[in-house]
Image (spheres, rainbow, N blue to C red):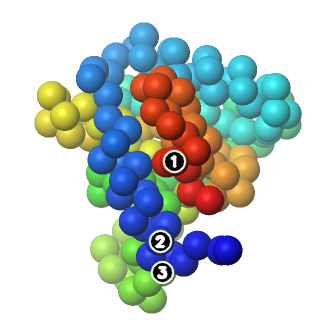
Amino acid sequence: MIPTPEQDAAQIQLQESTLTLPHFDANTAWTLGNWLCEVSVERRYKLVIDIRRFGRPVQPLFYTALSGTTPDNARWANRKSNVVARFHRSSYAIGLRLESQGQTLTQRHALPASGYAPVGGSFPIAVPAAGGVVGAITISGLASRDDHNLGVEALCHHLGADYEKLRLP
C-alpha cells in the first residue's frame, strides 16, 4: 500500500519529535558522517553528505562527495539544508506541506528556487537542551524519499532508535 502525503507528513512529525540529540558538536557530526559514508560505499550510493551547524555563519562540520557525484549534488544539498535552516523542519515535510497547499516556496514565502529545495534529503538536527534545531544532516544523490530515509536511518543508528518503525514506508 502506497502511503498518502498526509500519512508521510504524520510519520515525519513523529521522526522529528523522536530523533533529537542530547548534544551536537563536531564529534557527533563526524560519527554520523562516517557511518553514512561507510553505509553509502557499501550500498554503492553516489551521493553528497553534508552535516552542518546553523548560525552566522553556517558551520560545516562534515562534508563528502562520493565517487560519481557532480557539483549539482552539492548545490542540491545546500538548497535542501537552507529549507531546514529557514523552517526548522525536514525539507521533505516542507515540500509535502507546500504540495498539499498547491503552492511553491516562491509563491508562499517569496523564497527563490535557486536557494531553496523543498524536497527530501535534509533532516533537522534538534537538541532540546539547546533550544531546538541547531543544524541539519543532508543527503543528495538518491531519490527524494530515499535521501530523506537515509538521514533518518543515520540518526536512528546513532540514537539506537528503531529505524523500521520510524522510516517512511
> Which is more toward the observer, 62 or 22?
22
Nearest to N terminus: mark 1 or mark 3? 3
> Which is more toward the observer, 99 or 163?
163
Q: Are marks 2 and 3 in contact (CB under 8 Å)?
A: no
Residue, disc 2: 7
Query: Which is more foreground, mark 1 or mark 3?
Result: 1
Q: Is residue 117 above or below residue 40?
A: below
Q: Quadrant of the C terminus?
A: bottom right
Q: Residue at x 43, y 67 (%)?
A: 9
Secondary structure, mark 1, is helix
Q: Is residue 54 left or right of residue 30?
A: left
Residue 143 lies in quadrant? bottom right
Secondary structure, mark 3, is helix
Q: Residue at x 51, y 76 (%)?
A: 5
Residue, disc 3: 99
Query: Which is more foreground, mark 1 or mark 2?
Result: 1
Local packing at callout 2 (Cα closer than 10 Å; few below 14, some 14-19, many 20+) is: few
Q: Amino acid at mark 3?
A: Glu
Q: Residue at x 52, y 15 (%)?
A: 31
Q: Position of residue 58 (x, y in %)?
A: 35, 33
Local packing at callout 1 (Cα closer than 10 Å; few below 14, some 14-19, many 20+) is: few
Residue 45 lies in quadrant? top right
Secondary structure, mark 2, is helix
Q: Position of residue 160 (x, y in %)?
A: 46, 25
Is residue 155 visible in the rendered image? The answer is: no
Nearest to N terminus: mark 2 or mark 3? 2
Q: Residue at x 68, y 24 (%)?
A: 37
Q: Are marks 1 and 2 in contact (CB under 8 Å)?
A: no
